[in-house]
Image (cartoon, rainbow, N blue to C red):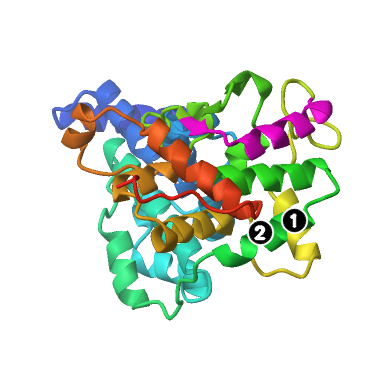
Amino acid sequence: MKQARELAADARAVSRSGKDPIKERERTKREAAKEVHTLRSVADAAFEARKAELKGDGKAGRWFSQLELHVLPKLGGVPVEEIDQKDIRDCIAPIWHTKAETARKAMNRLHIVLQYGAAMGLDVDLQAVDKAKQLLGRTRHKEQNIPSVHWSAVPGFYASLDTGTPTELALCLLILTGARSGSIRHCSLEQVHGNVWTIPAEYMKSRKDQAKEFRVPLSLEAMRIIDLARPFERDGFLFPGARKGVISDATMSAYMKRLGMDERPHGFRSSLRTWIAETTQTRHEIAETVMAHTTGSSVERAYLRTDYLDERRIVMDAWADHVTQRGQHNLRLVQ
């Protein structure tokens, strides 16, 4: 009863001041609600809003992982409106010099979350991330490229892949096509039509709303590898995992690591691109298309709608000849 009398007295006081007690009560509730907008709750909401443009609706967790691992354990329970550059600096400092790329991604994701908070009407500091970078200073970390096998040594490594296991066959196809490991691991018979392998958009490295399927010309050697992999096919996939799905992202890397190699599968893309640059006169736009890189401005790409499939076939046939030590094509016509 005492509490009820106090509430009634407060309401009469609000009314005497010329304000609507009901509207004031709602305003108070809204103000209280703001206090429960922790960084984690806003980050979860931002992630939900962004899922539609992420591959697989973000189920792989890569977009959110930097926040989950390096930011939310320390700042997740802090009201987002209270977070400042010092909080961010203290949170990121342990990895700023040792894991520079991870730190960069974490800061990028955090800025997106703060922007989302601002869109919610919360009083967040949109400059907090940039201010934190100033406090952290320049990173001492030196970027290192993924180690790769020199193109001249690729034939020797390729020849060693002679036991015909799914992992070795996947590495063979990766080397011969220059494709990324995700595309190789999810290669299916439905994607292969004659001497062309069409990689679906979801397995290409690009934003979900920008990804397009990509045609890969298959050399005779690449088609031979696909035929050798057919007996292992399960659920349509040529390189199935031990129990379900496809081989893991680390399978091919682990294979090379067991051989005592520092190089990694992704490095074979560098081997191929360097071979093209050093031994052929292939035009830049064709060489970059081999790597599934985009070239030219958006206007140029809007009008020039070729994927240079025939020209790339000449390049990839010659690469296959080099890899299998069968001699080389003369690529002077690919100009």
Q: Which residue is mark 1?
A: 159
Residue 52's label in the rendered image is: none
Q: Is residue 191 above or below residue 139?
A: above
Percent across and percent down for residue 97 are 48, 76
Q: Which residue is mark 2?
A: 155
Magenta region, residue range: 215-233
Percent across and percent down for residue 188 are 66, 25
In the image shown, does 136 or 266 lie closer to the viewer? 266
Q: Are marks 1 and 2 in contact (CB under 8 Å)?
A: yes
Which residue is pictured at 71% across the width and 42% down the height?
A: 170
Dot 1 lies on which element?
A: helix
Q: Quadrant of residue 19?
A: top left
Which residue is pictured at 78% across the width and 57% down the height?
A: 160
Amino acid type for the residue under numbered disc 1: Ala
Which residue is pictured at 56% across the width and 34% down the height?
A: 218
In the image shown, does 236 or 98 lie closer to the viewer? 236
Is residue 12 in view from this perspective? Answer: yes
Structural distance between the alpha carbons of marks 1 and 2? 6 Å
